[in-house]
Each structure stands twice: as structure tokens, then as C-alpha cells.
């Protein structure tokens, strides 16, 4: 580092512009490593239904998504940890720890993180209004978009009649759903052997069963009706594992999907526009894209060397 000029009293003066330029660490000038992806900068991100603590959680894909974004606010819209499953048997691999670390690191670096409890992590609800590690706990929230709209954020289980009035049916459905997810796990293991992209059997079945489709439609209508009564412009929820943006009367209904079946999120840009990110589709597209010429030539260069 350049030495600062000495004043008459022997003290060093303020560094000059030249001194500052030469004091910048050399590594800042180095090019980004090969394969580096610039972070996608957005205003807000909503994710839900991670179901950490279950084998169905697609933690690897979730970590990849979180590493690719930079946001001012991150909403965790319920069912982040699956207390129902953990109460029956402990399952917590390293990847699930990494998800928690990533979220806490985002909070530490200045992202506002709001965790809204769902039905699978309802044990967090008594702690609403408190915070830990920079993460705010809440039952619900009102989000103000960049274009001035008010969006109600809730997990959505309060609008699910099965969860509200027949919990035994919810647990029974959870068993059947767990079976589908286990089957889905083995299906995708086989698909990976053939270098095929991720595909969700449970999501496929859900979209083709008439009763499931009707339930989703009824759920969306109920959530939108409640949002209209609240006088808000839109509502963001999760719970049903079905990403959607739909105008229902005067209310815009948003669902951020899940990280078990579809691997989707909602993002708000700097202008207030909210869109769905289908991370499974994006990663499949990236995998199918041709490799850059310099990457393709690398093995040949090593052979020649």
C-alpha cells in the first residue's frame, strides 16, 4: 500500500485518490470464476411449503434458488418446517441445515425475513411477534408493493375446511400424500440416471384429479373473498402446493407454490410487478442449453497440456 504523506508534525495526512486506488485489494479486479452466475436482484421473494424435516423437501434445488437471488424482503409463507412429520420420526439431513443457514445469512446481510407459520409448523404460532436470528415471526402480514398496492400474506390453511374442521382427514390425506412423495423420490432417482429433468408425480396427479382441481378452485375463491373483505388489492398464500396468479374480481390471487412438488416462488421486481419463478423449469432449461465454447474446449486443452 502506498505510504501517506507526512505532515510537519509527523502525522500522516489523508490518503490521496491515487493512494485509495492502489489500496483496493487485487482480488477485486480478478474476473469472476467460470460458471459464476450474477444474482438476480428483486424487491421481494415469497416461498412456502418447504417441508424441512421430510424426504420430500427439495432442499438442493431450493439452495440453488436462494443462492441465485438478492432481495430486500423474503417472506417464508408457512410450512417451512414440517412439525407433523418430525413428531413421528426425526429426519434432518445436512441439506436442511444448509437451508436454515442460508436464510439466516440473508437476514444477517440485511434482507428482512418474515416467517409466517402454517399448519405444519403451527408450533411457531404462539411466538408470533417475536424474532430470532433476524427472522420475524408472524401469523400474517400486509405487504406494500413498489407500485403502492396492499397485499395480504397468509399461509392459507385458515381457508381450508379440511384442516379447520376435520383434522383427522387432513392427517389421513397427509399419509396418502406422503406415499406419493416417496414414489416421486424414486421416480426422479431413475430419471436422473437417464439425465432427465426433475418431474413431480404428485403435482401431475393433483392437476388431473377432478376433486383436487375443484378443491383448488374453491380454495382460491375463498382466499380472494376474504382479501376483498379486508380491503386489500391482493393476497399471497401457499398451502395447496399450486403456484398461481389469477384475478378474482377486484383481488389478485397469488400462490407461491412449494418446494416439494413444483419448486416455485413468487418475486416482485422494482416496479411492483409480481411473477412466478418456476425453478425446476429454469434449471431444466439451463441444463439443456449448449455449453459455452470455452467450456467445451477446456477438456481438449487439458489433454493437449
Image (cartoon, rainbow, N blue to C red):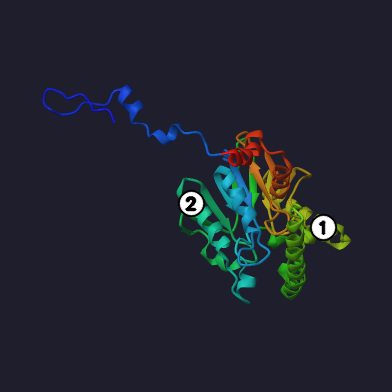
Look at mark 1 in the image and give the residue it sits on.
204
Residue 268 figure quarter? top right
Q: Which mark is residue 282?
A: none
| Element marked by disc 1 | helix
Number of numbered discs visible in the structure rendering? 2
Q: Residue furthest front?
A: 304
Q: Point out residue 16 in the picture as x, y percentages from the top left corner.
A: 29, 23
- Residue at the far right in the pictured view: 210
Q: Which residue is tagged 2?
A: 105
Q: Position of residue 51 (x, y in %)?
A: 64, 63
Question: Residue 234 at x, y = what percent?
Answer: 69, 45
The answer to whether 28 is drawn above or below residue 232 in the figure is above
Residue ID at (64%, 49%): 152
Q: Is residue 28 left or right of residue 3?
A: right
Left or right? Give the position of 76 relative to 245: left
**Marks 2 and 1, how far apart at CA:** 34 Å
Residue under the image location 83 percent in, 56 percent down: 207
Amino acid at each position: 500500500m502506498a505510504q501517506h504523506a507526512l505532515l510537519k508534525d509527523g502525522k500522516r495526512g489523508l490518503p490521496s485518490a491515487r493512494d485509495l486506488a492502489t489500496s483496493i485489494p487485487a482480488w477485486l479486479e480478478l474476473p469472476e470464476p467460470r460458471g459464476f452466475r450474477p444474482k438476480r436482484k428483486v424487491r421481494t421473494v415469497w416461498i412456502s411449503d418447504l417441508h424441512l424435516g421430510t424426504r420430500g423437501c427439495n432442499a438442493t434445488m431450493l439452495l440453488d434458488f436462494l443462492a441465485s437471488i438478492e432481495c430486500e424482503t423474503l417472506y417464508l409463507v408457512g410450512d417451512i418446517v414440517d412439525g407433523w412429520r418430525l413428531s413421528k420420526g426425526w429426519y434432518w439431513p445436512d441439506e436442511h441445515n444448509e437451508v436454515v443457514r442460508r436464510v439466516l445469512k440473508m437476514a444477517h446481510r440485511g434482507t428482512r425475513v418474515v416467517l409466517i407459520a402454517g399448519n405444519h409448523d403451527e408450533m411457531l404460532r404462539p411466538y408470533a411477534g417475536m424474532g430470532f436470528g433476524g427472522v420475524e415471526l408472524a401469523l400474517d402480514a400486509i405487504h406494500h408493493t413498489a407500485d403502492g398496492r396492499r397485499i395480504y400474506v397468509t399461509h392459507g390453511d385458515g381457508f381450508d375446511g379440511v384442516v379447520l374442521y376435520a383434522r383427522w382427514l387432513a392427517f389421513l390425506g397427509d399419509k396418502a400424500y406422503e406415499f406419493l412423495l416417496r414414489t416421486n423420490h424414486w421416480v426422479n432417482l431413475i430419471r436422473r440416471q437417464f439425465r432427465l429433468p426433475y418431474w413431480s408425480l404428485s403435482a401431475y396427479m393433483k392437476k388431473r384429479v377432478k376433486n383436487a382441481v375443484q378443491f383448488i378452485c374453491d380454495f382460491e375463491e375463498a382466499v380472494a373473498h376474504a382479501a376483498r373483505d379486508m380491503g386489500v388489492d391482493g393476497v399471497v398464500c401457499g398451502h395447496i402446493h399450486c403456484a398461481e396468479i389469477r384475478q378474482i374480481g377486484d383481488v389478485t390471487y397469488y400462490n407461491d407454490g412449494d418446494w416439494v412438488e413444483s419448486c416455485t416462488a413468487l418475486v416482485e421486481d422494482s416496479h411492483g410487478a409480481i411473477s412466478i419463478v418456476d425453478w425446476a423449469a429454469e434449471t431444466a432449461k439451463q441444463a439443456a442449453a449448449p455449453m459455452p465454447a470455452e467450456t467445451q474446449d477446456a477438456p481438449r486443452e487439458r489433454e493437449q497440456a
